[in-house]
């Protein structure tokens, strides 16, 4: 793909908080291409946070779709905490950029069946990160809107509690939530990472000189003052350090969650199913006592409606400590096999909500060779469902799928096959317009082939 040289400013506009600016910038970039890009690579990042929750590199949904086109990433998916603000923008942008796209939501839930076990949220027994993927539109029913509002209200209250404790501890550095945190977000949905950025900024404004600033942070983070200049020079690393020391488990602003800190898992499933999307379990690395009972955990989650499993592969193999790598890589292989036995397609990605995380996993790494095909099949699956639901309302949860594809295995195979056929902007997408709910899955695939 060849572009004219004046693209840098337009690419910055892809991350503007104004949606019309983002759309206009993408339209202009596509018109400026001197020649179209080559075929996309068969690689996937189906778990990219956008700036509607927190993207470490500032990417909007539109910017991520453009990034996929630039880098030749064939399949991409967004996931944001507590909101569906990215859905329509990302899927529309993917159609324009030729990227197979999907969208999702993530939140922490309470799971009483494992109340005594740590699962994918270390140090927090009973608390489970859980997801919905394969959303097909951002316009939702009143019921779904109410649940989304509850998630955002609960999240905002947790943020306000964190700020109250931090303002007391970090005095004279104090943050005003609406003025200094929410303004860092495009639609007022803030995360812990936004809070950290706000405190770092206000501390600089308060102390000015590097020596006074270093003294302040040395005291508050309980670190040697001599270490602070080098730590602060690494801005991404320093942000992670502040978050770890002050907000995460053991920090002054941390409060151990209880049963009422997060919504029950079933409540999130209500939202996902109301939107005809896919409840998706999430796996950390197999080292917690809850994830060591992964078969039992998945059996419970599948009974409650989970139909897919999310993985972040890089943290299970790309590790400097060889013993840790051996353990976690073996855990990865085991959970991929377990997902196969449960007929759970895989949703894999890098998250991109922390500095240093990759744009896309290294699918050519020898360590991923045994599981690479399962990763790719899962990406095609969720895209295939998304296309069928968005274009025809014949997705995984539809009455049509229930009638013609009675098992998870049947649905997995059909939507994966369709995802491979339906290249965005290609002739197969046009032929979808002639598909009806009177056609069998076999008829649909034959019509599209």
Image (tube, rainbow, N blue to C red):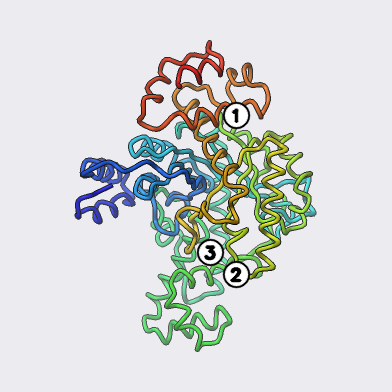
Which of pointers 3 and 2 lies earlier in the amino acid sequence?
3
Quadrant location of residue 440? top right
Q: Is mark 2 on a helix, strand or loop?
A: loop
Where does label 1 land, which residue? Answer: 413
Please determine whether, in this image, residue 394 is positioned above or below residue 46. Answer: above
Residue designated by label 2: 320
The residue at which mark 3 appears reads as: 163
Q: Choose between 337 and 348: the one closer to the eye.
A: 337
Give me the residue at 50% from left, 22% from top. 393
Q: Select label 3 or label 2 by which is in front.
A: 2
Q: Position of residue 389 (x, y in %)?
A: 50, 26
Precedes in sequence: disc 2 or disc 1: 2
Residue 173 left/right relative to 406: left
Question: Label 1: few (<14), some or many (≥20) within 10 Å?
Answer: some
Q: Which residue is drawn at 45% across and 68% down?
A: 236
Asked whether the viewer can see residue 275, the reply is no
Distance, label 2 to label 1, CA atoms, is 37 Å
Residue visible at 41% across and 71% down?
A: 202
Which residue is at the front of the view, 185 or 352?
A: 352
Residue shown at 50%/27% (left/top)?
418
Give the percent coordinates (x, y) of residue 253: 60, 67
Whether residue 324 sits left or right of residue 10 in the image: it is: right
Mark 1–mark 3 Cα distance, whole angstroms, equals: 48 Å
Q: Quadrant of residue 182?
A: bottom left
Where residue 362 appears, as percent x and y from the top left, is 51, 55
| Secondary element at tag 1 | helix
Whole-angstrom CA distance, mark 3 to mark 2, is 35 Å
Mark 2 surroundings within 10 Å by alpha-carbon count, few (fewer than 14), some (14 through 19), many (20 or more): few
Q: Nearer the viewer, residue 174 or 19?
A: 19
């Amino acid at each position: 793909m060849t572009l004219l040289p004046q693209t840098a400013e337009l690419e910055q506009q892809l991350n503007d908080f104004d949606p019309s600016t983002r759309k206009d910038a993408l339209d202009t970039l596509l018109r400026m291409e001197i020649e179209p890009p080559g075929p996309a690579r068969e690689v996937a990042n189906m778990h990219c946070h956008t700036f509607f929750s927190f993207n470490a590199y500032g990417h909007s949904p539109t910017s991520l779709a453009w990034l996929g086109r630039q880098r030749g990433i064939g399949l991409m998916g967004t996931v944001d905490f507590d909101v569906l603000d990215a859905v329509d923008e990302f899927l529309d942008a993917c159609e324009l950029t030729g990227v197979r796209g999907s969208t999702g939501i993530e939140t922490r839930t309470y799971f009483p069946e494992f109340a005594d076990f740590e699962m994918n949220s270390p140090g927090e027994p009973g608390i489970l990160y859980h997801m919905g993927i394969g959303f097909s539109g951002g316009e939702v029913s009143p019921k779904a809107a109410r649940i989304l509002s509850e998630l955002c209200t609960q999240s905002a209250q947790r943020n306000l509690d964190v700020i109250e404790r931090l303002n007391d501890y970090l005095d004279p550095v104090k943050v005003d939530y609406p003025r200094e945190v929410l303004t860092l977000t495009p639609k007022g949905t803030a995360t812990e990472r936004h809070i950290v950025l706000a405190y770092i900024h206000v501390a600089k404004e308060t102390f000015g000189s590097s020596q006074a600033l270093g003294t302040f942070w040395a005291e508050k983070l309980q670190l040697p003052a001599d270490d602070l200049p080098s730590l602060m020079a690494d801005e991404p690393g320093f942000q992670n350090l502040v978050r770890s020391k002050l907000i995460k488990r053991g920090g002054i602003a941390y409060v151990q969650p209880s049963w009422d800190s997060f919504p029950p898992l079933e409540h999130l499933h209500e939202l996902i199913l109301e939107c005809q999307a896919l409840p998706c379990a999430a796996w950390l690395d197999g080292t917690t006592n809850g994830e060591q009972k992964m078969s039992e955990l998945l059996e419970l989650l599948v009974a409650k409606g989970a139909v897919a499993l999310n993985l972040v592969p890089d943290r299970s193999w790309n590790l400097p400590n060889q013993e840790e790598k051996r353990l976690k890589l073996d855990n990865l292989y085991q959970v991929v096999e377990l997902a196969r036995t449960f007929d759970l397609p895989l949703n894999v990605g890098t998250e991109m909500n922390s500095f240093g995380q990759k744009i896309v996993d290294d699918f050519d790494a020898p360590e991923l060779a045994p599981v690479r095909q399962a990763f790719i099949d899962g990406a095609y699956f969720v895209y295939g469902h998304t296309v069928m639901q968005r274009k025809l309302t014949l997705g995984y949860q539809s009455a049509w799928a229930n009638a013609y594809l009675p098992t998870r295995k049947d649905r997995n195979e059909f939507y994966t096959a369709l995802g491979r056929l339906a290249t965005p902007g290609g002739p197969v997408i046009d032929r979808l317009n002639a598909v009806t709910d009177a056609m069998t899955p076999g008829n649909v695939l034959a019509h599209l082939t």
